[in-house]
Image (cartoon, rainbow, N blue to C red):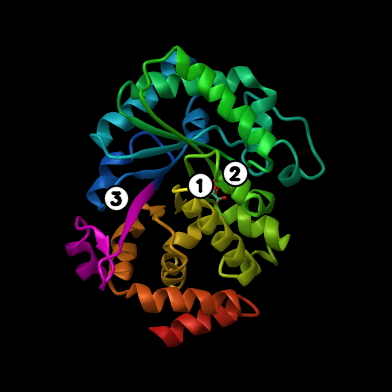
């Protein structure tokens, strides 16, 4: 199965009835792009920039960041790049920017909440990204957005920075990983260029289960119908406004989840580079009419086990 998938990994992922799903790779360093392309990734759907920051002993300045981003963009040779702004806090510490100890770090200063408090950090990053992109396409998304106000503040900052950079082809979007963002998707969809669903955190926050919890994390299953309903709302809102939706959490590479996500009309799946061939192969087995019906049934199930059983019976 893996061999058959590998042999066709450079071909697009098109369902039996001709519906194309983009399959991108997640990347957490600056060097991984050529390998991702070799596995068949059609672009980078999530560049986790906190790992680029962690690779530096002290805060990287504008020039150092610009060089890092340029390396990724050069390797992509025009393929799409979705970059996430710095996502630290919660489970992701950064030694040279100590965050005051919090009793509940997952519910504290994380992601865009933190960078909006430290605008100089985000402005430098945005400027470095836009300078590296120049006239190449660039998609920037903000992590952990939980309110329309946070989105607008981040967007306004990006627009301001864009004015004095050469960037020409810029899309701005958000990660949908806080339930409030999914619930407000109809409002946000009018303003963003795209959504990318972060199912790792969306599942954690929807089910109130710490994603790394030693006892409970196995129950933090993104195929929970409560999570699927939020994804469904997000896709419907986005498509009503002509915007695209990706899924970049680990769920996107789960063989049981691929038919459900495709059936919910997700446009793009972003997975670890090594998973790209199998995800593409999985998409090629699907028929959209049946897959959409399957996804609708999944939304009405009682729990993730029922959804998994439904997919098993479908195969
Ligand atoms: C997610 O939350 O699903 C996600 C992709 O982001 P991270 O795993 O880096 O928090
Ligand atoms: Mg996340």
The residue carrying pointer 3 sits among few (fewer than 14), some (14 to 19) or many (20 or more) residues within 10 Å by Cα, namely many
> Where does the image place residue 188, in percent across and percent down from the top left?
59, 44
**Which element is circle 1 on?**
strand
On the question of residue 60 being in view, the answer is no
Q: Is residue 129 above or below residue 85?
A: above
Instruction: Name the secondary structure under disc 3.
Output: loop
Can residue 21 be found in the magenta stretch? yes
Quadrant (top left/top right/bottom left/bottom right) for the C terminus: bottom left
Q: 10 Å neighbourhood of mark 1: few (<14), some, or many (≥20)?
A: many
Quarter of the rendering containing residue 28:
top left
Most extreme residue toward the left is 7
**Residue at the image point whose x is 38% and y is 21% from the top:** 167
Mark 2 and 1 residues: CB-CB less than 8 Å, in contact?
A: yes
Magenta part of the chain: 1-25
The disc placed on residue 241 is none
To which residue does mark 2 refer?
Answer: 188
**Mark 1 vs mark 3, CA separation in Å:** 19 Å
Residue in view at x 30 percent, y 63 percent? 280
User: Does residue 221 lie above or below 34 as drawn?
Assistant: below
Residue 248 place in picture, x, y as percent: 47, 52
* First along the sequence among labels 1 and 3: 3
* Quarter placement of the N terminus: bottom left
Q: Which mark is residue 41?
A: 3
Q: Residue at the location (27% across, 36% down)?
A: 76
2 or 1: tag closer to the N-terminus: 2
- Image coordinates of residue 52 in percent, x first then y, are 46, 31
From the Cβ of disc 1, is ligand 1 less than 8 Å away? no
What is the count of numbered marks? 3
Any mark on residue 195, and which? 1
Mark 3 and mark 2 in contact (Cβ < 8 Å)?
no
């Amino acid at each position: 199965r893996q061999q058959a998938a590998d042999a066709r990994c450079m071909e697009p992922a098109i369902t039996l009835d001709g519906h194309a799903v983009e399959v991108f790779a997640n990347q957490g360093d600056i060097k991984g792009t050529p390998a991702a392309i070799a596995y068949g990734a059609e672009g980078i759907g999530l560049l986790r920039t906190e790992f680029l920051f962690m690779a530096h002993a002290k805060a990287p300045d504008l020039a150092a960041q610009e060089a890092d981003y340029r390396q990724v963009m050069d390797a992509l040779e025009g393929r799409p790049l979705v970059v996430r702004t710095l996502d630290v806090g919660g489970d992701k510490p950064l030694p040279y920017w100590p965050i005051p100890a919090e009793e509940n770090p997952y519910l504290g200063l994380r992601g865009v909440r933190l960078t909006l408090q430290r605008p100089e950090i985000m402005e430098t990053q945005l400027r470095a990204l836009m300078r590296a992109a120049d006239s190449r396409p660039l998609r920037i998304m903000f992590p952990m957005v939980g309110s329309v106000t946070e989105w607008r503040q981040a967007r306004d900052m990006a627009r301001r920075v864009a004015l004095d950079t050469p960037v020409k082809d810029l899309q701005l979007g958000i990660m949908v990983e806080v339930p409030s963002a999914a619930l407000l998707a109809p409002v946000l969809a009018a303003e963003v260029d795209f959504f990318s669903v972060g199912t790792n955190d969306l599942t954690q926050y929807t089910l109130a289960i710490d994603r790394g919890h030693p006892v409970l994390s196995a129950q933090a299953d993104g195929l929970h119908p409560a999570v699927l309903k939020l994804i469904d709302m997000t896709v419907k809102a986005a498509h009503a406004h002509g915007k695209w939706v990706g899924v970049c959490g680990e769920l996107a590479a789960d063989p049981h989840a691929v038919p459900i996500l495709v059936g919910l009309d997700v446009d793009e799946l972003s997975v670890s580079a090594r998973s790209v061939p199998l995800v593409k192969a999985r998409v090629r087995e699907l028929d959209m009419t049946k897959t959409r019906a399957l996804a609708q049934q999944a939304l009405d199930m009682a729990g993730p086990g029922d959804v998994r059983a439904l997919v098993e019976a479908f195969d």
